[in-house]
């Protein structure tokens, strides 16, 4: 076609019936999103020139988005949230920290619970020892990604308290989210995780670890500490959309980020109200969309 100005992609749920149109300009490929699971879709394309003349429809192609379960795994794991215990062993106070292997935890102490600023760092601890199972048997091979990411751990140490106060309080905290912990642990085991932060109304933030190997994301509820591995497409928008449905909350924007040395580095950001065509490109094609080349 002379004076080529662009291409249009037509698609719909029936052969020869195209309910949607995407004008892609001069791009030779586009990603069509929001296709329904289990249903066939039919695609064709045209070219048009600067005078508005449009070519005949190209040969029709069909594709069916496969049905996947909405939820792969949901479970609770010992050590989430981290727990602290004190025992006396031959006159020596021993502190036990139960958490998950690979987690950096901060053991803090205070002599005044009425003052939230009184908490001071007592010990910085990396959990490396696997906690014994209730039946005393050694841990088995992880059966899914959640078991690989969150292995219950237990560390013991003798705290050294230097203040003379007759009463001491202790607590244990993890300085990052369980999504970040999953990212750190799974990378060390050969997985390909990505970190996504979803911004919710009221300026609240929620971290998600997307695992490319499973085409699913790990979520840990902040109130019940229940872990879930939910199927999702790979784009930031698809992950945020799926999480908002799972959590029954709206989202405003979402970003992919990396975590190193206690700092977040934003890689790319998607705003919900922006057109999906303006979203940053992804490294792989999401499972709930189709790449159309023409």
Image (cartoon, helix red, strand yellow):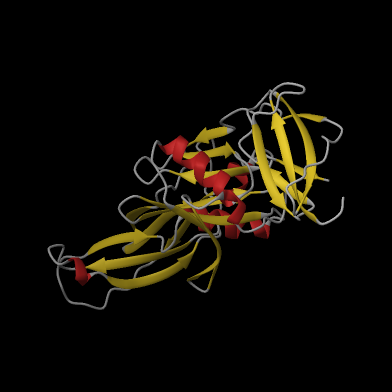
Residue situated in front as seen by the camera: 106 or 87: 106
Residue 281: percent from left, percent from top? 66, 57
Q: Find the residue positioned furthest to the front.
A: 51
Query: Is residue 113 something that shows in the picture?
Result: yes
Place residue 26 in its image quadrant: bottom right
Where is 85 relative to 77, above or below?
below
Where is 294 relative to 3, above or below?
above
Q: Find the residue positioned furthest to the left.
A: 114
Residue situated in front as seen by the camera: 185 or 197: 197
Residue 200: percent from left, percent from top? 38, 50
Residue 129: percent from left, percent from top? 55, 56
Q: Residue at x 37, y 46 (%)?
A: 222
Q: Residue at x 57, y 30 (%)?
A: 70
Query: Is residue 288 something that shows in the picture?
Result: no
Image position of 248 (left or right of 140): left
Q: Residue at x 57, y 44 (%)?
A: 238
Image position of 151 (left or right of 107): right
């Amino acid at each position: 076609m002379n004076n080529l100005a662009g291409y249009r992609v037509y698609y719909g749920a029936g052969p020869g019936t195209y309910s949607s149109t995407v004008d892609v300009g001069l791009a030779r490929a586009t990603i069509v999103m929001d296709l329904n699971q289990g249903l066939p879709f039919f695609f064709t394309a045209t070219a048009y020139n600067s005078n508005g003349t449009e070519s005949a429809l190209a040969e029709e192609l069909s594709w069916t988005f496969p049905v996947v379960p909405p939820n792969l795994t949901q479970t609770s794991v010992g050590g989430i949230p981290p727990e602290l215990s004190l025992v006396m062993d031959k006159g020596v106070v021993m502190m036990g920290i139960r958490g998950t292997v690979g987690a950096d935890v901060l053991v803090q102490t205070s002599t005044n619970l009425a003052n939230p600023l009184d908490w001071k760092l007592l010990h910085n601890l990396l959990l490396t020892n696997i906690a014994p199972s209730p039946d005393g048997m050694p841990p088995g091979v992880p059966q899914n990604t959640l078991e690989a990411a969150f292995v219950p751990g237990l560390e013991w140490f003798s705290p050294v308290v230097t203040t003379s106060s007759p009463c001491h309080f202790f607590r244990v905290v993890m300085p990052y989210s369980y999504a970040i912990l999953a990212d750190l642990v799974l990378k060390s085991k050969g997985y390909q995780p990505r970190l996504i932060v979803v911004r919710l109304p009221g300026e609240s933030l929620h971290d998600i670890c997307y695992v490319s190997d499973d085409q699913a994301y790990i979520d840990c509820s902040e109130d019940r500490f229940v872990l879930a591995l939910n199927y999702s497409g790979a784009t930031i928008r698809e992950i945020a959309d799926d999480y908002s449905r799972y959590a029954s909350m709206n989202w405003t924007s979402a970003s992919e980020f990396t975590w190193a040395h206690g700092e977040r580095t934003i890689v790319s950001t998607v705003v919900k109200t922006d057109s999906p065509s303006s979203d940053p490109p992804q490294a792989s094609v999401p499972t709930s969309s189709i790449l159309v080349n023409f």
